[in-house]
Image: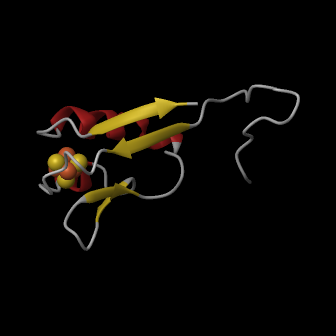
Amino acid sequence: MAPDRGDATGRIPKEAIVKAVVDRDLCIGCSLCVDTCPEVFAMGDDNLAYTIGESVPPDQYDCVQEAAEICPVEAISSVAE
Ligand code: SF4
């Protein structure tokens, strides 16, 4: 089912949608985030991390937090919408 992102009435979705973001200008390609959270992060052909999918599944929130904490250059952030 597609996530409810609100509509023209401005209705706010009941559950926040969390997205993980990798700042690829900061990423040094150490792959620690992929080792920690392989369902959310992957390494690209350019040896920089990227996020898989549009939003983070709820059971991966802790994992994303952990990845953000261990990233040596603090390139990972998460946003709740
Ligand atoms: S942990 Fe940080 S520096 Fe390492 S690959 Fe992931 S985003 Fe890049």
Q: Residue at x 72, y 52 (%)?
A: 2
Percent x, y of residue 63: 33, 40
Q: Residue at x 42, y 36 (%)?
A: 61
Percent x, y of residue 16: 61, 30
Q: Where the C terminus falls, by quadrant?
A: top right
Percent x, y of residue 31: 17, 56
Percent x, y of residue 35: 21, 55
| 3 lies above or below 62 | below
| 1 lies above or below 8 | below
Q: Quadrant of residue 66?
A: top left
Is residue 59 toward the left or the right of residue 42 in the image?
A: right
Q: Nearer the viewer, residue 47 or 65?
A: 47
> In this view, which residue lies farthest toward the bottom?
45
Q: Quadrant of residue 17?
A: top right
Q: Residue at x 75, y 41 (%)?
A: 4
Is residue 8 toward the left or the right of residue 57 in the image?
A: right
Q: Where the N terminus falls, by quadrant?
A: bottom right
Is residue 70 toward the left or the right of residue 65 in the image?
A: left
Is residue 33 toward the left or the right of residue 81 in the image?
A: left
Check the image and tell me how it is coloured. secondary structure
> In this view, which residue lies farthest toward the front?
25
The mark tally for this picture is: 0
